[in-house]
Amino acid sequence: MSPADPGPGPTPFGGGPDQLRVPEDPPMGPATQRVRHAEVTEQPVSVAALAQAVADPRCGAVVTFDGVVRDHDGGKGVSRLEYSGHPGAGEVIIEVAREITERYPDTVIALAHRVGPLAIGETALGCAVAAPHRKQAFAACDDLVNTVKQRLPIWKHQHFADGTDEWVGALG
């Protein structure tokens, strides 16, 4: 293991991206070229396709996130839900992807958030992050999901098994 390699141990999610850089790694290019896919879509989201989009011979790690619709929330059974997005949500998801690639210069990113009706088990948010090393990919993916949840103007309308429903803002 080289002295610059962060090596085994806890991933420093709280640390800065510079802690995770290995100086001998090849440059990854400008942030705009490292966003391979970013969209808000009504079509099913494939995490496998997102992982393929970030495949890069300079990268030894691909971390994915598959945010699926679960069958419960707040102690109540969820029967179905629907996501609604602001008309500008597509622009925001691209901004977020670029921001993360700027923050983590050794990453390649692909992500998609679905809107419309979704069934239990379907993917609502899918992300893939490739990086030369695993800790870079894990940290960037964690930051990407958190930033999407904070900034993307999408709202969730949950329908519960008991016949009630509620709107949940994805922001904040």
Image: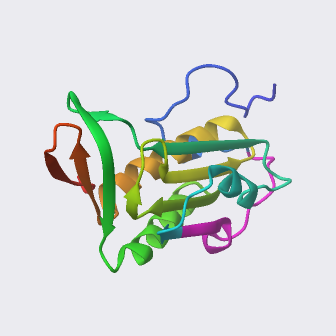
Q: In terms of image quadrants, where is residue 8?
A: top right
Residue found at the far top of this picture: 9
Q: Quadrant of residue 65?
A: top right
Count of picture labels? 0
Image quadrant occupied by the N terminus: top right
Vertical order, 79 against 96 (above or below): above
Provide residue 64's location: percent of width, then percent of height: 61, 44
* x 70%, y 48%: residue: 131
Q: Is residue 75 magenta?
A: no
| 31 or 63: nearer the viewer | 63
Whole-percent x, y for residue 70 in the image: 39, 37
Residue 172: image x %, image y %? 23, 52
Q: Is residue 100 left or right of residue 168?
A: right
**Magenta-tinted stretch:** 23-38
Residue at (75% x, 45% y) in the render: 132
Is residue 26 one of those drawn in magenta?
Answer: yes
Residue 62 in the image: above or below residue 97: above
Viewer can see residue 132: yes
Residue drawn at x 20%, y 32% is 74
In the displayed structure, 66 sits above or below 37; it is: above
